[in-house]
Amino acid sequence: MARYVGAVCRRCRRSGEKLFLKGDRCFTPKCSIDKRPKPPGMQPRRRPRISDRGMQLREKQKARYSYGMMERQFRKTFAEAERQAGVTGDNLLILLERRLDNIVYRLGFSDSRNQARQLVRHGHIILNDRRTDVPSALVKEGDTIGWRKESAKSEYYKQLTQTIEAKTVSDWLSLDKKNLVGQMVSLPTPEGIAAPFNGKTIVEHYSR
């Protein structure tokens, strides 16, 4: 399966803003975009003007980078958003937020989506009391997300029980901090999600 293995901080620098791909590091002076805000590579003498097509591509790439998806998988998600009733840009954002790896991240079980994807891939997470290792699995309203009994014995889980109290979750999620069990109480809404990209611009990109 194809995956990006390069430096994730280059993606933030290329996008021109923080995408919070490295968890807590993004909030420290070690953040690469704070130290080197210019895009990677040789710098031109004059900053070129970005075309409308370039802006649309940048917004699409920011969405891909934020959720850690390759182009083919992202395009498939967009096609699903198009088939649904309503605004395609909003549908896309909701589908991305419903991914299991994103829910694990939103519940505070991980510091980044990359780390959440690894937890799911290694079989530490259970969905509705059933083990799953598919990060792209869509969570439905009322579904519960927890930890495998074997994983609850790990050192990571023990550290998480000490740090989870300081974390907050979105209003469309609930979390039992004592047992580390979360639930999607309602579907996410575009207004309640601070997305670093513009869904309408992504729709324009794929409409050409």
Image (cartoon, grey):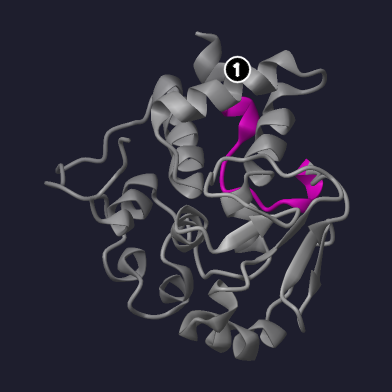
Where on the picture, by quarter, is residue 46? top left
Position of residue 6 relative to residue 64, above or below, is: below
**Total count of labels:** 1
Query: In front: 16, or 131?
Result: 131
Residues in magenta? 190-203
Secondary element type, mark 1 = helix
- Identify the residue at image location x=77%, y=84%: 178
Q: Quarter holding the N terminus?
A: top left
Q: Quadrant of residue 37?
A: bottom left
From this view, report whether residue 142 is shown above or below residue 32.
above
- The residue under label 1 is 79
Q: Residue at x 49, y 81 (%)?
A: 156
Q: Which of the 4 image quadrants contains residue 175?
A: bottom right
**CA neighbours of label 1 inside 10 A, class few (<14), some (14 to 19), many (20+):** some
**26 or 135, which is in the foreground?**
135
Q: Residue at x 14, y 43 (%)?
A: 45
Q: Is residue 207 magenta?
A: no
Above or below — where is 172 with respect to 140? below
